[in-house]
Image: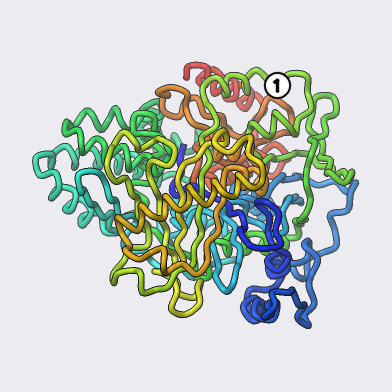
């Protein structure tokens, strides 16, 4: 499972808003072109705090992102594929299919695309909903999946290189910067653990071995045998390398070379920000993708914020002749004779397609959208191996720039006193300060702080509105105090804007069961063997996103989208396929998952 800086959503804490709601002013601003938002933001405020409408034409949600799009997408019209949800996985699948000539309809519950990779604006601050750490955004190799997805629909974004992926602040005053240049990082890590020089080099060399094998391949569906055989004949050593590491975890390999307990705990922290579990539970292939891509292609932040990625993909989708509808809440996947043939919305509209792709979690897909007496056996197997990963408490803040010391890094991971707190709720803190890279995201003289820490839905149940708001403030205040004590003295007095989100927020706005961000192994897994791919036991229904192989994180869900599009394209006749080989491969993959 692959995740870095887990994606989050924010709950507004301002007047005239229901619990976890967005104020009307922000809803209106979300519908305006970026260039006009800041001037419109000022026009929407008044001294009395009363909303005043500026003299601008506000587009309908369906037209806000896709100005000039066709008026198609009528209920009853049939498509090659319907995609439920416009997260990065869903958008990549949709745009890849559209680029191949398929007619695609994306249905998004909210008013803008992106899901947990979206954005929102408040008082001239532009906040990333989730991660500000962007992998797969370089201009080289085969793992630059975001760059490739954008290029497929004619888009390229300007990016800002991040010189430091993350600055670790760990127990025992251990401070480690993960520099963009690999040799600089290894040199710093060895300086902290000189007696483990050999072990450090051997572990990270093994990561590079896996990364280089992946990076040498053309990445398509692992469920499509013609592609697999072609890659094997072209790159047999690389394919066998990946097969060898498929059932292995990073912690086991680290322990082959490293004995120092504190260094092994550091490897745990490295993996935790990838997968929200320790190294023994993190598949080695996933760890290697992240631990090496941050040096190979580097972390590159899109100018204007992460939300621009989803906007560009949505625009490219429409340019290719497909469609995206907003405020389109899918409540049911329509089955006919056991095959997925369309979807039904909460307002009663129905849309039909040859295939249906769900960008919802597998728990939501098979627990809510598919109305069957019993979920398929392979989904039961998946739930036996994996549980829902915890959600997060998020704090988005605008602060005065003077509170940050010079040369402050963009991304920080904080675990102050006890390694045992790494995986506990509220135990560790991830902090992003994207304005260190792109100052245009905040008013002059200010910075954005995006703080998040793991939190369970159970911790927020049974509270009335008043107690809920009170608890949000108490927990947030404690987290901010920890940052003030560790990194930024005077932080509380510098705050000009603060919004707090909880697992309930994530569930509400992202429609994710318990606010989860994907699967987490119940026990030590056999690498990635247990992770399902894109096909499902229901004919015509596919899944995409973080509860599919290879797991969580922007680069992982983009990979999932590319794989899904290839498999669907083969099934609808846009790519070569062999039904006999397909059936044999799918049976083999299903059997392998039972071994997990």
The answer, for residue 383, to whether it is visible in the render is yes
Q: How many marks?
A: 1
**Residue 186: image location, x then y, percent:** 20, 50
**Is residue 202 positioned above or below 122 on the image?**
above
Q: Secondary structure at mark 1?
A: loop
Here the colouring is: rainbow
Tell me the residue at 51%/59% (across/down). Answer: 396
Left or right: 110 in relation to 334? left
**Is residue 149 positioned above or below 25 on the image?**
above
Tell me the residue at 64%/52% (across/down). Answer: 91
The answer, for residue 359, to whether it is visible in the render is no
**Residue 2: image location, x then y, percent:** 45, 41
**Residue 581: image location, x then y, percent:** 61, 25
Q: Nearer the viewer, residue 285 or 459?
A: 459
Left or right: 196 in relation to 536? left
**Residue 356: image location, x then y, percent:** 74, 39
Q: Nearer the viewer, residue 270 or 104?
A: 270
Q: Which quadrant would residue 180 be assigned to in this image?
A: bottom left
Q: Which quadrant would residue 545 be assigned to in this image?
A: top right
Label 1: how many residues lie within 10 Å, few (<14), some (14-19) or many (20+)? some
Left or right: 9 in relation to 442? right
Tell me the residue at 76%/51% (across/down). Answer: 105
Left or right: 30 in relation to 156? right
Looking at the image, the residue that sits furthest to the left is 195
Q: Nearer the viewer, residue 95 or 167?
A: 167
**Is residue 432 positioned above or below 351 on the image?**
below
**Is residue 126 positioned above or below 112 on the image?**
below
Q: Which residue is mark 1?
A: 375
């Amino acid at each position: 499972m692959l995740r870095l800086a887990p994606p989050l959503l924010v709950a507004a804490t301002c007047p005239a808003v229901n619990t976890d709601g967005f104020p009307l002013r922000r809803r209106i601003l979300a519908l305006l072109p970026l260039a006009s938002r800041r001037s419109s933001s000022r026009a929407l405020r008044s001294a009395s705090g009363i909303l005043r409408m500026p003299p601008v034409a506000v587009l309908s949600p369906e037209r806000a992102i896709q100005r000039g799009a066709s008026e198609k997408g009528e209920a009853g019209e049939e498509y090659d594929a319907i995609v439920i949800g416009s997260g990065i996985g869903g958008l990549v699948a949709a745009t890849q299919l559209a680029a191949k000539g398929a007619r695609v309809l994306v249905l998004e519950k909210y008013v803008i695309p992106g899901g947990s990779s979206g954005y929102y604006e408040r008082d001239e601050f532009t906040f990333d909903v989730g991660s500000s750490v962007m992998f797969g955004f370089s201009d080289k190799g085969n793992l630059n999946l975001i760059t490739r997805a954008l290029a497929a629909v004619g888009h390229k974004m300007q990016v800002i290189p991040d010189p430091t992926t993350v600055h670790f602040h760990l127990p025992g005053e251990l401070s480690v910067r993960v520099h963009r240049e690999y040799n600089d990082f290894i040199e710093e890590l060895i300086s902290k653990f000189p007696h483990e020089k050999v072990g450090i080099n051997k572990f990270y060399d093994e990561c590079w071995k896996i990364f280089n094998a992946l990076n040498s391949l053309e990445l398509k569906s692992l469920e499509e045998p013609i592609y697999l055989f072609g890659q094997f004949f072209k790159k047999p050593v690389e394919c066998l390398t990946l097969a060898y590491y498929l059932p292995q975890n990073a912690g086991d390999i680290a322990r082959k070379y490293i004995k120092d307990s504190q260094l092994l705990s550091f490897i745990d922290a490295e993996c935790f920000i990838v997968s929200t579990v320790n190294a023994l539970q993190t598949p080695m292939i996933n760890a290697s993708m992240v631990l090496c891509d941050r040096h190979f292609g580097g972390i590159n932040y899109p100018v204007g914020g992460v939300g621009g990625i989803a906007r560009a993909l949505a625009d490219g989708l429409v340019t290719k002749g497909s469609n995206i509808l907003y405020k389109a809440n899918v409540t049911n996947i329509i089955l006919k004779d056991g095959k997925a043939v369309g979807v039904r919305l909460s307002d009663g509209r129905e849309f039909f397609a040859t295939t249906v792709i769900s960008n919802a979690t597998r728990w939501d897909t098979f627990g809510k959208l598919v109305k069957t007496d019993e979920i398929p056996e392979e989904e039961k197997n998946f739930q036996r191996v994996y549980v829902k990963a915890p959600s997060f408490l998020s704090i988005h803040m605008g602060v005065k720039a003077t509170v940050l010391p010079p040369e402050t890094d963009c991304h920080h991971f904080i675990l102050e006193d006890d390694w045992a707190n790494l995986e506990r709720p509220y135990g560790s803190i991830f902090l992003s300060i994207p304005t260190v890279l792109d100052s245009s995201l905040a008013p002059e003289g200010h910075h954005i702080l995006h703080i998040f820490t793991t939190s369970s839905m159970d911790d927020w149940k049974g509270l009335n509105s008043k107690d809920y708001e009170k608890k949000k403030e108490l927990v947030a205040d404690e987290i901010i105090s920890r940052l003030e004590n560790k990194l930024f003295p005077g932080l509380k007095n510098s705050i000009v804007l603060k919004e707090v989100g909880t697992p309930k927020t994530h569930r509400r706005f992202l429609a994710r069961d318990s606010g989860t961000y994907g699967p987490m192994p119940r026990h030590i897994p056999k690498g990635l063997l247990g992770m399902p791919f894109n096909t499902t036991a229901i004919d015509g229904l596919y899944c995409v996103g973080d509860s599919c192989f290879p797991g969580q994180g922007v680069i992982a869900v983009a990979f999932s989208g590319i794989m899904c599009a290839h498999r669907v394209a083969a099934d609808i006749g846009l790519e070569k396929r062999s039904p006999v080989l397909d059936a044999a491969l799918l049976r083999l993959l299903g059997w392998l998952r039972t071994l997990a």
